[in-house]
Amino acid sequence: MRSECSTKCPEMELKPDVITYNLVIDYLCKNGRCKEARRAFDSMVQKGLKPDGITYGILINGYASKGDLVDMHDLFNLMVADGITPNHHVFNILIHTYAKLQMLDQAMFIFTNMRQQGLKPDVVNYATVMGGLCKAGRVDDAMSQFKQMVSEGLTPDDVVFGTLIHGFCAIGKWDKVEELTFEMLDKGIQPNLVYFTTIISNLCREGRVMEARHAFGLMVGVGVTPNVISYNTLMDGYCLDGKMDEAVKLLTGMVDIGLVPNVITYNTLLNGYCKNEMIDEGLAFFTEMLGKDVKPTATTYTIMLQGLFQAGRTPAAMELYSRMVDSGIQLNAVTYNIILGGLCENWFLNEALTMFQGLISKNIELNIVTFTTMIGALFKHGRSKAAMDLFAAIPSHGLVPDVVTYNIVMVNLINEGHLEESDNLILSMEKSGCAPNSRMLNAVVMTLLLGGEMSRAVAYLCKCDEKKFSLEASTASVLISVISGGNCEELVKSLPEKYHFLLKARKT
């Protein structure tokens, strides 16, 4: 029977077709296996199957996703050579990839090449080009593309408008933002909540709270209902601007329309109270928050701790810290830094040292800010040896001093007359790859000038000049004062030429 079947039913061979290969190549590309996908592509060609536009598009997108620009472009050229005209989608893959990498010349070349291939760009292609131009700050060029698109009879969609509007927001051209918003409405495109919230956020970040309020009103006026995030965003703007009464009015209005404030709402207002030195109002609001069964987060406690320490209310801050620990909230390095910094600033150094040593013994993960805080406090309280010992111990905790750490140690070494040690420190700092910044060199120059170390100050002024750093107003003032009051004509001559005018001013 078996034999009969084999004679009457020749063995069937299942041969994969183009669709099957496309599915395999797509799977491999989506899983980042582009080399295997290319082998499947080559195998397909060797077996006499002709890849279609979909095959090329899938593999080109795979290369683009991995950033393999050479392979991506080579395959694109092979596609054209194979007589297959790339469609809008394939062109958009290339444009998007180059634009994302800020390779705008290449993106624009591909965009122009579309027409040479007999294909007019569509709205998606234009949107991609405009997006790349806006991200590069070339918003006017993006606007030119917008006008070209409209002149070709294409209707801009919400993505196009959103791209341009975000671009103009980023450079602060709010008149263009409003103009485009109304143009969008005229074309029957309804801006959504994300659109308005983004504009409000950008305006608040620029400190233009009244305009943000105007955008909020416009949002309501065109029928978009604000949500908790929208309210929180504008509320934060008012808080940063010191308008706490307006922020509280927003909270009331939010509740009146049936929205429930979340913990971010409360954190925003608490931060506003603390930043504006209204700690009593902040504490009352914190109590109100607890009464409404809104559970404080680590951020909530951190805001309140910082506010209490800044107000000099250390016992209340430490009581809140105990409550935070009892609540089971996990503290991180940021919170510990605020507590240690607050204790040190309010002259509770011993308490800070006890906590710091306790954290070290418990292997709590700290950062360089923690060590810098403690080193600065020890110097401030005249415990220089302990400060230097802690500085020396930093590497043993797996950390590296940053420019702020070096600045504190350097200035204190100079103040204490350890000038050679301070010179050696800046050399070792530079060898470690941590370059002094403008702020540090200004602090060093000022400290040396105030200490009468004019020759060393000149050396560091020359270093400032080499790095093209400007003198801060306070440093320049001290320099002028020192030159005006002393016999340092030869030293002034050794300064970079731009400071020689000080000598002439002294003679007059």
Image (tube, rainbow, N blue to C red):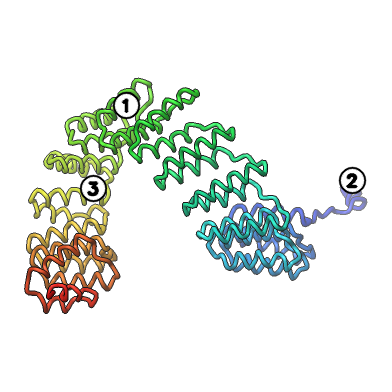
Judging by the rendered image, the residue that carries numbered circle 1 is 285
Q: Residue 77: which quarter of the image?
A: bottom right
**What percent of the width, then of the height, locates residue 414?**
11, 62
Residue 11 in view here:
yes
208 vs 71: above or below: above
Q: Nearer the viewer, residue 364 or 282?
A: 282
Q: Quadrant of the C terminus?
A: bottom left
Q: Quadrant of the N terminus?
A: top right
Callout 1 amino acid: Phe
Horizontally, residue 136 falls left or right of residue 421, namely right
Q: Tell me the residue at 65%/69% (across/down).
A: 74
139 vs 232: above or below: below
Judging by the rendered image, the residue that carries numbered circle 3 is 370
Secondary element under disc 3, as helix, strand or loop, is helix
Q: CA distance from mark 3 to mark 1?
A: 30 Å
Q: CA distance from mark 2 to mark 3?
A: 85 Å
Q: Tell me the residue at 58%/39% (across/down).
A: 192
Callout 3 amino acid: Thr
Secondary element under disc 2, as helix, strand or loop, is loop
Callout 2 amino acid: Met
